[in-house]
Amino acid sequence: MQRDPKTNLRRATIVYWILLFYIVAALVWWAFLLIQQNDEIFQLQKQAIESQKLAGQSLDAIEEQRKRNFAKYLGEGFFFMLMILIGAVFIYRSVRRQINVQQQQRNFLMAVTHELKTPIAVSRLNLETLLKYELDENKKEKLLQMTLQENLRLDTLINNILIASQLDGDSYKISKEDISLSDLLNDVVQQFSGRYPERIIDSAVQENVEITGDPILLKLLVSNLLENANKYSPKDKAIGVHLFNKNAGVLLEVSDNGSGIPADERKNVFQKFYRIGNEETRRAQGTGLGLYLCKKIAEDHGGQIEVIDNLPQGSKFKVVIPS
Ligand code: ADP
């Protein structure tokens, strides 16, 4: 049976601290014994000189030797201690990172299983209902609309998983086409509005904003940001979409009026599989791949992405891509 990564982390931490304590204590003890031995040798030599058993040695010379040895042991001790501490910090950080990745992969597997099964189950139920019962046009359309939404959700999820693994494995060949980012953005927003007709989109898209890039990846970037804005903000609040030329590049902003992202999580959310909170308390569905992909896509286009506070509330994702 596989152990919970948290238990692993706890055990590894305990073993690590015990070992580190033992190594440091052994080093201090070793230095202490050497210094003591040095003093004893000095005392013996001193007695031998005083009783004239050690010919040809002066007191000054053995005192000098004692001081040199003392400095050598202290110097070596400090150097070893420094090396041990540097190594200890390095091991501690990499083990923690490794165990966190394990935990995130576990969460991802749980989330992805759920995310794959739900749309399939919902679509099947809707289609079975349509086949079995004579429904009025309104209900039929509602069911079909829901099925379509689930289908699109599945499509986005599969695209995220496939493209993330292809980009990671360098097997995705990024195309470089001259595209109108304005048209691409308007298309994605239109599709999004078709899926969530009740959502208000406050869109300000400058015309003829052009860049060279991969339209599939850029569409994925925009739709992930829109999906997140939709997931993490109240349904009756507007989502802002802005695009304009800025300096030697383009600036795309997607903002929402949701709960926002705490300052200390703003770097983490772009990590692969990272999701704020824990699986038990989290309500929104997801896999932790969306923002990782957004960052990767922005960087693969020579740009960058960041998240800041949206005023008065929520978050604002800013993507800058050189034109
Ligand atoms: P997920 O599939 O969990 O949405 P993402 O990589 O897209 O994965 O996002 C990572 C985490 O960042 C999310 O779990 C969520 O906690 C947080 N997040 C992303 N977008 C927003 C947003 N617009 N508002 C608040 N939190 C967000």
Image (cartoon, helix red, strand yellow):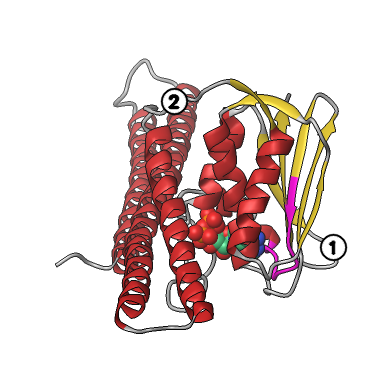
Give x and y (percent) for residue 305: 67, 41
Q: CA distance from mark 2 to mark 1?
A: 71 Å
- Residue 282 visible in the picture: no
Callout in the foreground (2, 1): 1
Residue carrying label 2: 65
Q: Residue at x 36, y 69 (%)?
A: 123
Query: Whereabouts is ligand 1, in terms of quadrant?
Result: bottom right
Q: Nearer the viewer, residue 68 or 275?
A: 275
**Residue 260 is covered by the magenta coloring:** yes
Residue topped by disc 1? 311
Q: Nearer the viewer, residue 304 or 199?
A: 199
Q: Is residue 301 at least partly visible in the picture?
A: yes
Identify which residue is drawn at 72% across, 52% down: 254
* Magenta stretch contains residue 259: yes
Task: Please state the extent of the stretch shown in magenta in the rendering.
Answer: 253-262
Q: Is mark 1 within 8 Å of ligand 1?
A: no
Instruction: Name the amino acid type tagged 1.
Output: Leu
Q: Amino acid at mark 2?
A: Gln
Quarter of the image containing the N terminus?
bottom left
Q: Please tell me which residue is depicted at 75% across the width and 47% down the height of the picture.
A: 253
Query: Relative to residue 319, is residue 163 drawn left or right?
Result: left
Pinpoint residue 251: horizontal percent, then vertical percent: 77, 38
Type of secondary structure dominating the magenta stretch: loop
